């Protein structure tokens, strides 16, 4: 099944076709694995989570073989990005609790790289600031999740959020500035 078949498959899921979930993973697995691999390639040597494990854990959090009715490709990948974000945040919290007694230090969000490339403290600081941004502007927070935690490019984020690329660029600039100020005020 090719990527153009994804809307058809999502429609089958919405209608309750139980075999559609079995067909969904092979269709999107390569793309999810590629995103995860790119993020994990910059991870520190002590990091033990592999891209395949991240994809599999995200798949299970999305529902595994019992996938919900996805509206479209953007809906699915936004949910996948959120699942990966939560996995990275949970792992960062566990590792900090073990290494530093759970006390997270705030770090600035300079030229934003993907979450997997940052240490646990940075991931947690960005996540905390992102939660605050979501209260102010949920759409811009969603853009940051897709960009920072899923590693999507701005054109991919624009498509996922169904906004124009220039709008995505403006929202990204705003969100980066907002998060930078928030991180500076919270710690460093």
Image (cartoon, rainbow, N blue to C red):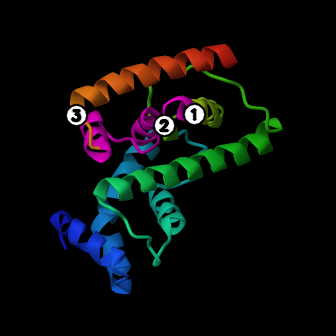
Q: Quick check: marks 1 and 2 in contact, CB under 8 Å?
A: yes
Is 134 inside the magenta-drawn segment?
yes
Image position, residue 134 (x, y; %): 54, 35
Mark before the other along the chain sequence, 1 or 3: 1
List the residue tagged with mark 2.
Answer: 138
- Residue 148 placement (x, y as % from top left): 44, 36
Left/right placement of residue 103 relative to residue 24 reads right
Q: Earlier in the sequence, mark 2 or mark 3?
A: 2
Residue drawn at (37%, 26%), measured in percent from left and top?
A: 172
**Dot 2 alpha-carbon crowd within 10 angstroms: few under 14, some 14 to 19, many 20 or more:** some
Q: Residues within 10 Å of mark 3 (few under 14, many from 20)?
A: few
Dot 1: few (<14), some (14–19), or many (≥20) neighbours within 10 Å? Answer: few
Identify whether 55 is placed above or below 133.
Answer: below
SS type, badge 2? helix
Which residue occupies the foreground of this view, 139 or 172?
139
Q: CA distance from mark 1 to mark 3?
A: 23 Å
Residue 111 showing in the rendered view: no
Which residue is labeled 1 in the image? Answer: 135
Helix, strand or loop status at disc 3: loop
The residue that mark 3 highlights is 164
Question: Residue sitting at 64 percent across and 49 percent down?
Answer: 91
Please give the label number shown on residue 152.
none
Q: Magenta segment, which residues? A: 133-161
Q: Give the CA separation, mark 1 to mark 2.
A: 6 Å
Report which quarter residue 158 is drawn in. Answer: top left
């Amino acid at each position: 099944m090719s990527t153009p078949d994804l809307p058809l498959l999502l429609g089958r899921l919405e209608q309750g076709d139980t075999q559609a979930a079995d067909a969904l993973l092979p269709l999107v697995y390569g793309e999810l694995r590629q995103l995860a691999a790119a993020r994990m390639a910059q991870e520190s040597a002590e990091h033990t989570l592999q891209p395949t494990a991240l994809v599999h854990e995200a798949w299970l959090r999305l529902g595994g073989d019992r996938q919900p009715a996805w509206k479209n490709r953007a809906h699915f990948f936004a949910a996948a990005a959120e699942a990966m974000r939560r996995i990275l945040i949970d792992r960062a919290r566990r590792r900090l609790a073990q290494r530093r007694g759970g006390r997270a230090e705030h770090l600035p969000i300079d030229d934003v790289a993907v979450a997997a490339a940052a240490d646990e403290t940075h991931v947690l600081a960005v996540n905390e600031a992102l939660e605050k941004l979501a209260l102010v502007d949920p759409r811009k927070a969603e853009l940051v999740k897709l960009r920072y935690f899923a590693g999507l490019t701005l054109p991919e984020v624009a498509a996922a959020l169904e906004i124009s690329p220039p709008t995505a660029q403006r929202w990204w600039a705003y969100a980066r500035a907002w998060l930078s100020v928030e991180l500076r005020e919270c710690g460093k």
